[in-house]
């Protein structure tokens, strides 16, 4: 009494969200929490003894191009075009930390923290130009097994990025090559071309790209996740997603490996959030294909992460080596002297054939073909035979 009774229709009416949608959202939430816990646990798993770290490092140092090819489909190592040097190209937005990553990788395989920085790092992008010339770095220094290529940062203009990526992947990369965009100002192009003439790298060898390392700034990704009203922050993750899905960066079904930098500026929880967020947008495993390599950290865990990332990239580079074109390869293997002899022999055969056609086929028919003599038979004299 005195209270308002709720109708049975309102009691029995289901919520707006259907049961199937609720189950999907619940499963998605559980999956995300599981990935979070796995990523956080992976940071603890990186704390390994020094002996295990040296063993993992020795596997990278003993790598040779084609050593990790999977012998499937009846294919052998000799059936592939194995390069003398495996080329890994670093791609990412401007300021993502590509040059710093190269220095960190180089220090792992050289003299540790005492090794000098090989790549020029830009600390104030509003003052300096950044990387405009492709730079090749053998890892370790003096080796020929594999190399890293530092490249110009991606811009907000997707058409310029696509054109640049297409050129690098389809035409190859060359040490010292100038990377100019169509949208660059005339003054910038003139300044960069002037620097290019001073470098003298025109004779460098062109290398085909074997795999791609996609580098992103973890702090910029986190800003795009937390700021809903900042259009610049949202465009960062949109540009990353669009360029990562560029077909030129994938080798068959294998998409690039992702490295998240600037993790030293974030908490461990935020670093895990960034990896999960990138995995959802890029469609790859946050735990297996996205590697967290902070800029300033130089502990054993970071070194192991670098080694694991390189092993992933080199294994997938070997797995996607192109098969040989036997006809073209045999033609390339023929020494120049043999080619000359084959040409001379071919000319001799052609000359002989021409001589025969001109001098033999034009002779009178009675010379080449003799008709049989006419027979005169006296049938009256031999009639007694019948």
Image: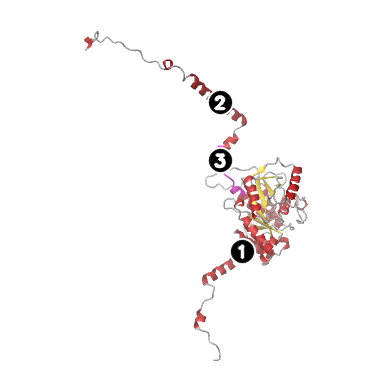
Callout 2 crowding tier (Cα within 10 Å): few <14, some 14–19, many ≥20:
few
- Which stretch is magenta? 317-327
Judge left or right: residue 4 versus residue 113: left
- Which of the two residues, 188 or 375, is positioned nearer the viewer here? 188
Residue 140 location, x and y as percent? 71, 47
Front: mark 2 or 1 = 2
Tell me which label, 2 or 3, sits earlier in the chain: 3
Q: Which residue is mark 1?
A: 35
Residue 247 location, x and y as percent? 59, 52
Q: Residue furthest top?
A: 381
Callout 1 crowding tier (Cα within 10 Å): few <14, some 14–19, many ≥20:
some
Residue 274's place in the image compared with 330, above or below, is below
Q: Which residue is mark 3?
A: 325
Quadrant, the N terminus: bottom right
Q: Which residue is mark 2?
A: 347
Front: mark 2 or 3 = 2
The magenta stretch spans residue 321: yes
Residue 5's place in the image compared with 364, above or below, is below
Residue 56 location, x and y as percent? 67, 52
Quadrant, the C terminus: top left
Name the residue: 67% across, 64% down. Answer: 231
Say what secondary structure mark 3 lies in: loop
Name the residue: 55% across, 27% down. Answer: 346
Does the CB distance between marks 2 and 1 fall below 8 Å?
Answer: no
Report whether residue 24 is seen.
yes
Does the CB distance between marks 3 and 1 fall below 8 Å?
Answer: no
Say what secondary structure mark 2 lies in: helix
Report whether residue 311 is seen.
no
CA gap between label 2 and label 1 equals: 71 Å
Splitting the image into 4 quarters, where does residue 344 fall?
Answer: top right
């Amino acid at each position: 009494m005195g209270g308002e009774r709720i109708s049975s229709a309102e009691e029995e009416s289901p919520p707006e969200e259907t049961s199937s949608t609720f189950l999907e959202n619940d499963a998605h939430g559980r999956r995300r929490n599981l990935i979070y816990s796995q990523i956080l646990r992976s940071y603890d798993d990186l704390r390994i003894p020094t002996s295990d770290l040296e063993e993992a490092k020795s596997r990278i140092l003993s790598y040779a191009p084609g050593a990790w090819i999977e012998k499937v489909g009846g294919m052998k190592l000799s059936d592939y075009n194995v390069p003398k040097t495996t080329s890994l190209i670093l791609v990412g937005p401007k300021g993502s930390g590509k040059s710093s990553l190269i220095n960190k990788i180089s220090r792992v395989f050289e003299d540790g923290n005492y090794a000098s920085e090989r790549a020029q790092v830009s600390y104030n992008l509003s003052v300096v130009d950044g990387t405009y010339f492709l730079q090749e770095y053998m890892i370790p220094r003096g080796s020929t097994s594999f190399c890293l290529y530092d490249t110009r940062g991606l811009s907000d203009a997707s058409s310029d990025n696509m054109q640049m990526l297409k050129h690098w992947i389809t035409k190859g990369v060359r040490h010292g090559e100038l990377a100019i965009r169509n949208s660059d100002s005339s003054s910038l192009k003139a300044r960069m071309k002037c620097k290019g003439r001073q470098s003298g790298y025109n004779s460098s060898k062109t290398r085909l790209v074997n795999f791609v390392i996609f580098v992103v700034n973890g702090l910029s990704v986190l800003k795009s996740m937390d700021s809903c009203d900042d259009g610049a922050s949202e465009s960062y993750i949109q540009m990353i997603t669009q360029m990562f899905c560029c077909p030129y960066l994938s080798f068959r079904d294998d998409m690039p490996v992702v490295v998240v930098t600037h993790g030293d500026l974030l908490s461990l929880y935020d670093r895990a959030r960034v990896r999960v967020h990138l995995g959802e947008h890029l469609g790859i495993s946050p735990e297996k294909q996205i590697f967290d390599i902070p800029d300033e950290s130089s502990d054993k865990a970071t070194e192991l992460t670098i080694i694991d990332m390189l092993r992933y990239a080199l294994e997938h580079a070997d797995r996607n080596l192109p098969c040989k074109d036997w006809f073209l390869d045999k033609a390339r293997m023929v020494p120049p002297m043999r080619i000359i002899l084959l040409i001379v022999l071919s000319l001799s055969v052609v000359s002989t054939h021409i001589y025969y056609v001109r001098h033999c086929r034009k002779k009178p028919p009675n010379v080449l073909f003799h008709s049989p003599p006419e027979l005169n038979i006296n049938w009256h004299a031999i009639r007694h035979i019948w």
